[in-house]
Image (cartoon, helix red, strand yellow):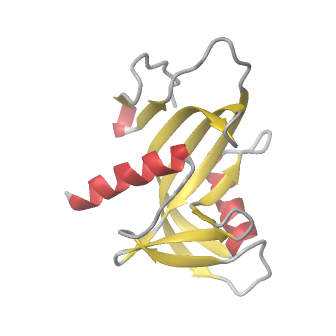
Amino acid sequence: MIILTINCQNDIMFLGDNMRKIRLGDKDKSLKYDFRETCFGIYKKGNQMLVTFDKKYNQYSLIGGGIEPGEKKHDTLRREFLEEVGIKIKGIKHFVTVDCFWLAGGDYPMESLANFYLIDVDKFLDIKSEGSYEFVDIDKLVLPLPYQNKAFELFKEEIKK
């Protein structure tokens, strides 16, 4: 993928093969940002989304996580789905990348480069995993992380077309 700098807040750029990248938030040059690149899967069944629920923070999240050194994005997504919820993925298609400058926890400067993919599930495996998944009605789902929320908003717009 081509990495572009987008000067206008919340602009959408279309890259090759209709790949989209969005910049969310403005980078404050007086702050030192930690950087983390992640991958998340979007899976819709009927009018529901597949998500995890974090009891510690009392919030929903799309399934995914950080890219490990030397790991390809598709491999990250497959690994995270197996580790987190015991789901095997069969199909992956890029949806959007969100480059987000934000204050994690309200005061910790982060640049989160979050890659979102539309996925097809192969199997729901009965194995021990880190967490559990659930399907939540799209109209009731709230995703508090800014980059996940932006991708989810775009997804809702797409399915209304």
Q: Residue at x 61, y 49 (%)?
A: 39
Q: Is residue 103 left or right of residue 99?
A: right
The quarter of the picture where residue 133 lies is bottom right
Q: Position of residue 5 (x, y in %)?
A: 49, 18
Q: Position of residue 35 (x, y in %)?
A: 71, 31
Looking at the image, residue 15 lies above or below residue 79: above
Q: Residue at x 54, y 68 (%)?
A: 90
Q: Position of residue 46 (x, y in %)?
A: 35, 78
Q: Position of residue 98 (x, y in %)?
A: 50, 38
Residue at the extreme left of the image, as rendered:
161
The quarter of the picture where residue 122 lies is bottom right
Q: How many marks?
A: 0
Quadrant where the C terminus is found in the figure: bottom left
Near-viewer residue (104 or 34): 104
Near-viewer residue (143 or 47): 143
Q: Residue at x 33, y 58 (%)?
A: 156
Q: Is residue 13 left or right of residue 25?
A: left
Near-viewer residue (11 or 94): 11
Q: Is residue 69 left or right of residue 84?
A: right
Q: Residue at x 36, y 55 (%)?
A: 155
Residue at the extreme front of the image, as rendered:
106
Residue at the extreme top of the image, as rendered:
30
Looking at the image, residue 11 lies above or below residue 83: above
